[in-house]
Amino acid sequence: MSVDLVVLAVFMGLVTYPSRALPLLAPGIERLPRVATEYLRLVGPAVLTALAAVNVMVVTPEGGTPVFHVGIEWLAVAVCAALTAWRRNLLIGLAGAVVIVAVARALGVASLPV
């Protein structure tokens, strides 16, 4: 089992932490222009989206070149986006996506990308 993704997740957390912690660390951040606060608010979700897109759309077979992948993960991402927009809660959307992929893999409908 590889821990590469865990290391990547920790690294990305450290990289995006300053922009997420800025409102806590910088007094008077509410005086920034609205465009700046909107930008800072969306940095974390943008990074998460980029990581998810790469993992859903591209598969690298052992010793091969990356290939475009269409699988159950696409449905999970769509459900995640819909639930998040509907409930205004990212945790509910992510939980729904995880459940879909876990059930599909348990039933043998989907397998881990190779």
Image (cartoon, rainbow, N blue to C red):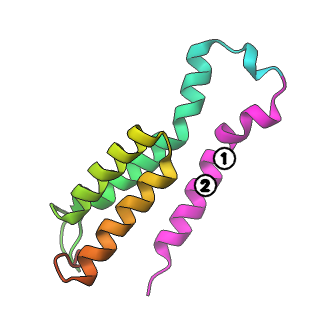
- Element carrying mark 1: helix
Q: Nearer the viewer, residue 9 or 73?
A: 73
How far across and down, in percent of the image, does residue 85 sit?
39, 38
Pointers 1 and 2 in contact (CB under 8 A)?
yes
Residue interval drawn in magenta: 1-27
Mark 1 surroundings: few (<14), some (14-19) or many (≥20) residues within 10 A: few
Name which residue type carries label 2. Gly
* Quadrant in the picture for the N terminus: bottom left
Direction from residue 45 to residue 49 in the image, left or right: left
Q: Residue at x 27, y 49 (%)?
A: 78
Q: Which mark is residue 17?
A: 1
Name which residue type carries label 1. Tyr
As drawn, 39 above or below 106: above
Q: Nearer the viewer, residue 79 or 29?
A: 79
Q: Residue at x 38, y 60 (%)?
A: 96
As drawn, 71 above or below 112: above
**Disc 1 from disc 2: Cα separation:** 6 Å
As drawn, 1 above or below 29: below
* Quadrant in the picture for the C terminus: bottom left
Q: Which residue is mark 2?
A: 13
Count of picture labels: 2
